[in-house]
Amino acid sequence: MRIGVALGHAGAPVAESLDLARQAEAAGLAAIAIGDANVETLATAAALATVTSRITIVSGIATWTRTPVTTAHAAKTIQNLAGGRYRLGLGPMPKAWSEEWHGIDYARPVERMRDYVGAIRAALAATPEAPRDHQGPFYAFRGFTGKPMVPEHPVPIDLAATRPKMTELAGEIADGVLFNTMASPQWLATDGRDALARGLERGGRDRSALEIGVLRICTIDDDAARAHDLARPGLAYYWGIPYFTDALRFHGFEEEIAVGERLAAGPFDWPARCAAISDRMLETMCIAGTPAQVRERAGAYEGVVDWLELAGSVGLPPEVAREQTARIIETFRSGG
């Protein structure tokens, strides 16, 4: 199992992410990931490609706000800079972001994502000698001539997944899947595994066709209790989002669901939301503790996923978030 680290926490200068990327590569980590949540992933991934030479670079994730042609062109450019080290991770954003910020209807997200991936792949395959068309239920273009790159490298496409239907789609059509932070080892080894198997069967593929990763909130401190407190904001963000309730119910966290529903229905109270994250939720959905505890808990994913994307918790002051990212890098340094 390989270890990667998420970069680009809120408030961080892009130059800071570039510096941490260099540190991650020097430490022997396998991957760095950057998503659209806090910075623009495609521009930042291109910058990361110019300051590294070995480590895999993942857009984890790029949202569906860009046209397929724009996404394909950008991904080819990044892949050229990275020399084949780039993976394009795609996912839907939260419903409110999609509809209220970008005017994209959130209805039928799995069907939209299927069409989006198909359109991007058509655009990636287009050449001046063989222009491509795409006509789908959501996306369409005609006569696209492609954007040749020298040298040319294929672009693997990963899908972000939280629920079974998107997981099935990843198994059917994607080169990889990146599970959301609330996907526990227990869920991944049962419901998640079964959903992937259904998708792989529908696509006529076997497990070797798919790179499986999972995003994990990971906070580290010599004081395990402080590490737990640092992780709480990363889960508190999800109160009131339906798929968080589904994940909690899978583990029988009914008391926590009741508290979370009351909080979501009332005035926004960030300290109360954080306090409502119980220790057993943290143990199930995060990797938090001392360096030795974190290394041990990461081992629970061996044989379940191919790689872990570890992220210092959200909702922390920028200096603390940077320190947590640096601790992840040091804790999982090769040979450490």
Image (cartoon, helix red, strand yellow):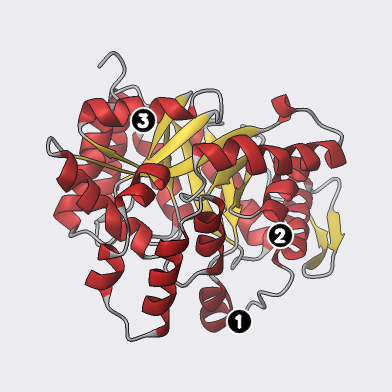
* CA distance separating discs 2 and 3: 33 Å
Q: Report the disc number at residue 103.
A: 1
Q: Amino acid at mark 3?
A: Arg
Up-down relation of residue 136 to residue 58 (above or below): below
Q: Amino acid at mark 2?
A: Met
Q: How packed is label 2: few (under 14 Cα within 10 Å), some, or many (20 or more)?
A: many
Secondary structure found at label 1: loop
Is residue 132 visible to the viewer in this orientation of the structure? yes
Closest to the observer: 209 or 83?
209
Q: Is residue 129 left or right of residue 95?
A: right
Q: Which mark is residue 297?
A: 3
**Residue visible at 40% across and 70% down in the picture:** 260
Specify which label sits upstream in the sequence, 2 or 1.
1
Residue at 36% of width from left, 77% of height from top? 263
Q: Position of residue 138 (x, y in %)?
A: 78, 70
> Does 257 sit above or below residue 178?
below
Circle 3 SS class: helix
The CA distance from mark 2 to mark 1 is 16 Å
**In the image, what residue occupies the spot 16% across and 51% down?**
320
Q: Nearer the viewer, residue 250 or 1?
A: 250
Image coordinates of residue 68 in percent, x first then y, are 69, 60
What residue did someone put label 2 on? 113
Q: Is disc 3 in contact with disc 1, using a CB cutoff of under 8 Å?
A: no
| Whether label 2 touches label 1, CB < 8 Å | no
Judge by depth and name the residue closer to the eye, 195 or 135. Answer: 195
Residue 156 visible to the viewer? no
